Amino acid sequence: MSSEPGRRVVVTGATGNVGTSVVRLLSEDPEVGSVLGLARRLPDWSPPKTDWAAVDLAAERPHPVKEFQGADAVVHLAWAFQPTHDPAATWRTNVLGSIRVFQAVAAAGVPVLVHASSVGAYSPGPKGHTVDESWPTHGWPGAAYCREKAYLERVLDTFEREHPEVRVVRMRPAFLFKRQSASEQRRIFGGRFLPGPAARPDLLPFLPAIPGLRVQALHTDDAAEAYRLAVDSGVRGAFNLAAEPPVDAELLGEMFGARPVRLPRTAARSAVAAAWGLRLLPASPHLFDAVLRLPLMDCTRAHTELGWRPHHTSTEVLEEFLLGLRRGEGAETEPMRGRKVG
């Protein structure tokens, strides 16, 4: 490990969409002396002050206490979105793996745990106004992603009571995008055979306008800055993270120059369910149900207590991401690597 002074921070899931941004910002932070990135597959990427260790949180192995020894903070980002047809597999990775991380934090005496929760942890809520961090976090029970995020909120409730010496921060970001995540997210949500070059405005004469489809987006680098601030500051608790404006059919229609055409929820869900059932689409109809019910988040607490504000609007985020889709962009890690269709 690096002998430079400063905080030692361990990042799980360090080679994914959020992990690559968090590791980069931490490696540039003068208050951070060293970063240890944990991932299933070690990357060729070598940011300053950063070392790597191969750890598979889904495997039945001892808790990662050894990797956490001497750390000043653990940023827990590791998460598996697939396989959506096998929720037991994602439960083993996401829930049981996270519990092992929390237990290892306590066993190693790490004073700070920053956990990646999500807007997906929230119970169904309003689309016409925003909610703060006190909104219930019971998720949408039909979607594995939401069940897992909500369950870990309950696990952390118990963890905080049993380990008051650990400063726990829960980040609840909106949907996260950046140009370099385009290939990975196309595969995760759209499938291996969805052609990225098809993400062109001139190919969409009209845009489906589905009732309830109004969500928030955020640039991954902006979310990573909130994680960095949480490590450096003394804050505790949950923080909503999102950019303005909310994304809906009207906004997308303006971006694409396409006319929004109302499409009933039932028709849209039936199409998603059919494609998912045929294994043509990785994103499940249950996640579609959840997205239609997600509340819009109020980020005042992050603004005032973290001193955080996003540098990108949601429109800029989506424009950058769509450009990445068309170009097949990726990054220097296995999960993020750009790949051709199929």
Image (cartoon, rainbow, N blue to C red):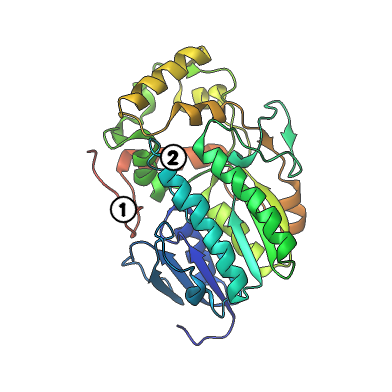
The correct choice, above or below, for 33 with respect to 266 in the image is below
Q: Residue at x 66, y 72 (%)?
A: 111
Q: Nearer the viewer, residue 62 or 207?
A: 62
Q: Residue at x 63, y 47 (%)?
A: 172
> Residue 177's spot in the image, x, y percent?
48, 45
Task: Check disc 2: other Cα within 10 Å, few if <14, some if 14-19, many if 20+.
Answer: some
The correct choice, above or below, for 263 with respect to 215 in the image is above
Q: Residue at x 63, y 35 (%)?
A: 245
Q: Nearer the viewer, mark 2 or mark 1?
A: 2
Q: Nearer the viewer, residue 68 or 97?
A: 97
317 to the left or right of 191? right
Q: Which quadrant is the C terminus positioned in? A: top left
Q: Quadrant of residue 328?
A: top left
Q: Earlier in the sequence, mark 2 or mark 1?
A: 2
Secondary structure under tag 2 reads: helix
Tell me the residue that label 1 is attached to. 337
Instruction: Report the amino acid beneath label 2.
Output: Pro
Whether residue 7 can be seen here: yes
The correct choice, above or below, for 286 with respect to 42 in the image is above
> Residue 76's spot in the image, x, y percent?
54, 60
Q: Nearer the viewer, residue 11 or 330?
A: 11
Tell me the residue that label 2 is attached to. 87
Task: Check disc 1: other Cα within 10 Å, few if <14, some if 14-19, many if 20+.
Answer: some
Are the two marked residues, 2 and 1, in contact with CB atoms closer than 8 angstroms? no
Q: Nearer the viewer, residue 91 or 176?
A: 91
> Residue 39's spot in the image, x, y percent?
40, 63
> Residue 334's spot in the image, x, y percent?
32, 57
Q: Quadrant of residue 14?
A: bottom left
C-alpha gap between disc 2 and disc 1: 25 Å
Q: Which quadrant is the N terminus positioned in? A: bottom left
